[in-house]
Amino acid sequence: MQTERLIVPKRVHWNQTSLAQRLIGEDIPTVNDGVFDNRLLVIDDEMAICRIVQRTAESLGFEAVVTDNPEVFTRTVRLWHPTVIIMDLKMPTIDGIQLLRILAGERYDGHVVVSSGSDQRVLEAAMRLGQERGLRMGGLLAKPIRVDKLREMLVSFRHVSKDALSTDLADAIATNALFLEYQPKFDCGRGKYTGVEALVRWRHPQLGMIRPDEFIVLAETTGLISSLTDRVVAAAVRQAGLWHADNMLLEVAINISARDIEDLSLPDRLQQHCFDNGVDPDAIILELTETGAMREAVQMMDVLTRLRLKGFRLSIDDFGTGYSSLVQLERMPFSEVKIDRSFVAHMIENSGCRVIAEIVIDLARKLGLKSVAEGVENQATLDALVKSGCDMAQGYFLSRPIAGEKIAPFVRGHLAAPAPLDRTGGDDNTAPVG
C-alpha cells in the first residue's frame, strides 16, 4: 500500500480506536457533532492533482480528504459523510462508473463532480448516468484541472449558516453592497442584440461570491425579498435610463419572485421606479418562474394583470420544467415564454430536447407570445433556434453576464454581426445595487 493513499486535513477530529480495525489500517476522520458542514472527498490516482485540489478546497474553508484507494474511498463515504465528492473516471483498479454505482448503493446525497481527461461526450454520459441513478451530479471538471474553475465549483457547493448569512444579506441590501451584471439577449430574427437580462450578484466580504439561488431563497424565507427586489429593479431601471439617454434602446429583463407577486403594492412601486428614471415600463420585462407563475391565486392574477396594464411585459421563465396546465398559461397575462436551458443546451445531440424546444417555440407563436431560449452554448444551437423561429436567445456562447458600463460597447460592436464575436466573461467592475 502506498504511503500517500490517504491525505487528511490537519484540523479533522479523529476516532482511531473505533475505526482502525474497520478501515484496513487506514486512519479516516469521522464527523464530530456536525462541526464540518463543508467536507470534500477526492479520489484520483494522481497525487499531484489531489494536493492541488486539497489546497484549493482548504483555502475556501473545506475539510478535505484525498485518496487513491477505492476501499478507503467507500468507507470514507460511509463514515465521514462528505458533502462534496470529486472523482476521477479512469482509475487503475476501478473506474468512475463503478464508483457511481457504489455511491448510489450508499444513497449518497452530496454533490458529485466527475473529473477526467476523457472525451467530453464520455464525461457527459457519466453525468447522465449518475443523474439516472439518483445522484446529485454537480458538474464536470476536465483535466488538466483549472484552479479558477475548481474554485468556482467549490464555492457553489459551500454551505453557509443561514442565520449568519441572513443578517449579512440584510446589511448588504441596506448598504447597497449587491451589484448587477447584464447578460445580452440576441434577436434571432434581426441578427443583433436588443436586450439584456439583469442578474443580481453578492460578493460577501469573507465568503466571496454567494450563489443567487442561495441568497434569493434566503431573502424569500426571511422577509427580505421585497427590499431586495426594490433594490434590483431600481438599479436596473436606472441603468436602462442611462442606455436610453445614450440612444441605446435596450429591453431589460428583471427576475421577480413569486413572493413579490403576493404584494398588492408591487405594480405601483415598480411603476414609480420607471417614472423616476424616465423609462417606459414597456422596456421592462419581468420574469417569473413557471412554478411561481402557476399558483392558483386570484391575488396573483390581480397583480400580474395590473403590471400589464401599467405597460410592463411579463415572461414565464424556465418553461417546461413545472407541471402547469396549458389552460393556466393561456389565462395568465404573459407576453413571453422562456424555454428552460435544460432543453436548449442539449437540443443538438438529444432529439427529445429539440422537439420540446420546437414545440414551445410553436406554442408561443400561436399564443401570440415571444419565445426566448436561454443556455445557448454553441453556434449549432443558435442556428437551430433561428431555423425554428425562436425570437430571442441568450447564453455563454453569445455573452456571459457583464458589467452595465460594458453593455453599450458590446452591443454597438456587434450591430452587424449575425454571429457573436465576444464570448468572454465579465469582470469585477460592477456597480452596486441601489
Image (tube, rainbow, N blue to C red):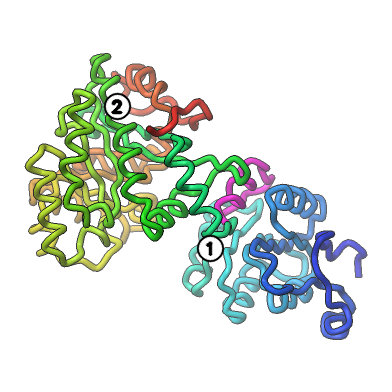
Rendered position, 320 above or below 79: above
Circle 2 packing at 10 Å, graded few (<14), some (14-19), many (20+), is: some
How far apart marks 2 and 1 lie (CA) works out to: 39 Å
Determine if residue 89 is in view.
no
Visible residue check, residue 226? yes
Q: Is residue 284 above or below residue 375?
A: above
**What's the mark number on residue 383?**
none
Tell me the SS state at disc 2: helix
User: Looking at the picture, which amino acid does disc 1 mark?
Assistant: Met
Q: Nearer the viewer, residue 344 or 274?
A: 274
Q: Is 155 displayed left or right of 401 in the figure?
A: right
Q: Position of residue 297 (x, y in %)?
A: 15, 64
Q: Which mark is residue 137?
A: 1
Q: Is residue 77 above or below residue 416?
A: below
Magenta span: chief secondary structure = helix
Secondary-structure class at tag 1: strand
Is residue 139 left or right of 185 when viewed as pictured? Answer: right
Q: Earlier in the sequence, mark 2 or mark 1?
A: 1
Amino acid carrying label 2: it is Arg
Residue that numbered label 2 is attached to: 238
Q: Residue at x 16, y 33 (%)?
A: 281
Rendered position, 276 above or below 268: above
Magenta residues, start to end: 140-157
Q: Residues within 10 Å of mark 1 (few under 14, many from 20)?
A: many
